[in-house]
Amino acid sequence: MATTKNITEQTPAPTAYERYEDEIVQLLQMQGVDVTPLPKIEALELPRQTQKPQIFVLVNGGEFSEREEMTVVAQLETVQCELFIRAKNRRGKMGIFAVYEDAKGRLLGYRLQGAKTPIYFNSFGYVSGLHNYWQYALTFSFAAYSVQADQPDETPLIREITHEITVL
């Protein structure tokens, strides 16, 4: 007789970087523009026609400051992000520059959940213009703390205290 096991797979909680990307994608939702996290780097290199503007969101990583220790270790991280904006035209209502201005207005000064500082910009510039589409990149940053994960203490908690006092 065969036995079956009931195995339930739990979806792991998203990482901080995934949460940042998802929040930025939600913030940048605008009519007539496809906004998604960058699926694969090949998406930027594929020479294809762009019918409507696209924004790809990417968290590149971060740089850490000196650690701070109180009861846990924490480090302030400057999280570095990039938007790749692709459109058929540079100018006009749905051109690169119009989409950039809309995205810039939504991002600059916005504080992501869990971030210490609001978003600030680093650079904006041309990436490529092949096969009848234009692509520009906007780099930006914000600071957030990385905190030591909770770890079970090897020393068990004291549940009861008994103390004998001798009176002389």
Image (cartoon, rainbow, N blue to C red):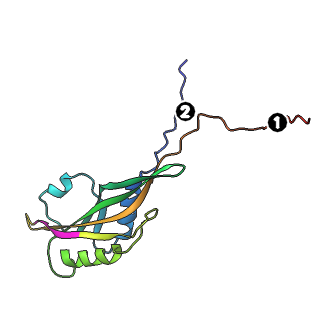
Q: Quadrant of the N terminus?
A: top right
103 lies above or below 19:
below
Magenta region: which residues?
Answer: 123-128
Residue at 15 percent of width and 71 percent of height: 88
The CA distance from mark 2 to mark 1 is: 50 Å
Which residue type carries mark 1?
A: His
Question: Was residue 126 drawn as part of the magenta stretch in this picture?
Answer: yes
Where is mark 2, residue-wise? 6
Where is mark 1, residue-wise? 163
Residue at 85 percent of width and 34 percent of height: 164
Which residue type carries mark 2?
A: Asn
50 lies above or below 90:
above
Residue 52 seen anywhere in this rendered image of the structure: no
Q: Nearer the viewer, mark 2 or mark 1?
A: 1
Asked where in the image residue 77 lies, by quadrant, the reply is bottom left
Percent from the top left, x then y, of residue 48? 13, 60
